[in-house]
Image (cartoon, rainbow, N blue to C red):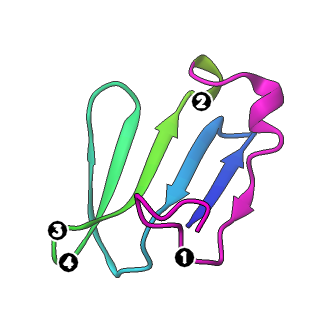
Amino acid sequence: MRVRYDEDADALYIRVHDGQYDESAENGQGVILDYDVDGNIIGIGILKAVAHFAPADLRTVNSEIGRPLAKPGNRGQ
C-alpha cells in the first residue's frame, strides 16, 4: 500500500493494489475510486484533503507499507 499527498493539488491518494487501472468513479464529494479491469478497487483519491485532515498530518503522510498486514485475530502473535 502506498499513501501520497500532493500539496500543490491538495490531493491524498491511497494505492491499495497494483492491478491494471481501468476506470474511476467519483462520489460527488471529492472521493475518487480507481478500479482495475476486474472491478476491484486499486486506489482511493481524496480531493481537497485539508478539508478532511489536519495539514500537519498530511505533511508526514507519504509512505509505503512493504510488508503484509497482520490478519484480524493475529495481532501480537
Q: Is residue 16 magenta?
A: no
| Residue closest to the far top | 51
Question: What secondary structure predominates along the stretch shown in magenta?
Answer: loop
Q: Which mark is residue 21?
A: none
Q: What's the distance in space between the residues labelled 3 and 4, CA to CA?
A: 6 Å
Which residue occupies the foreground of this view, 18 or 72? 72
Which residue occupies the foreground of this view, 53 or 75? 75
Provide residue 31's location: percent of width, then percent of height: 38, 36
Residue type at the position of mark 1: Pro
Q: What's the distance in space between the residues labelled 4 and 1, CA to CA?
A: 23 Å
Residues in magenta, as a range: 52-77
Q: What's the distance in space between the residues labelled 4 and 2, CA to CA?
A: 27 Å
Q: Earlier in the sequence, mark 4 or mark 2?
A: 4
Residue at 16% x, 77% y is 38
Q: Which mark is residue 49?
A: 2
Q: Earlier in the sequence, mark 3 or mark 2?
A: 3
Query: Where 53 falls versus 24 (above or below)?
Result: above
Residue type at the position of mark 3: Gly
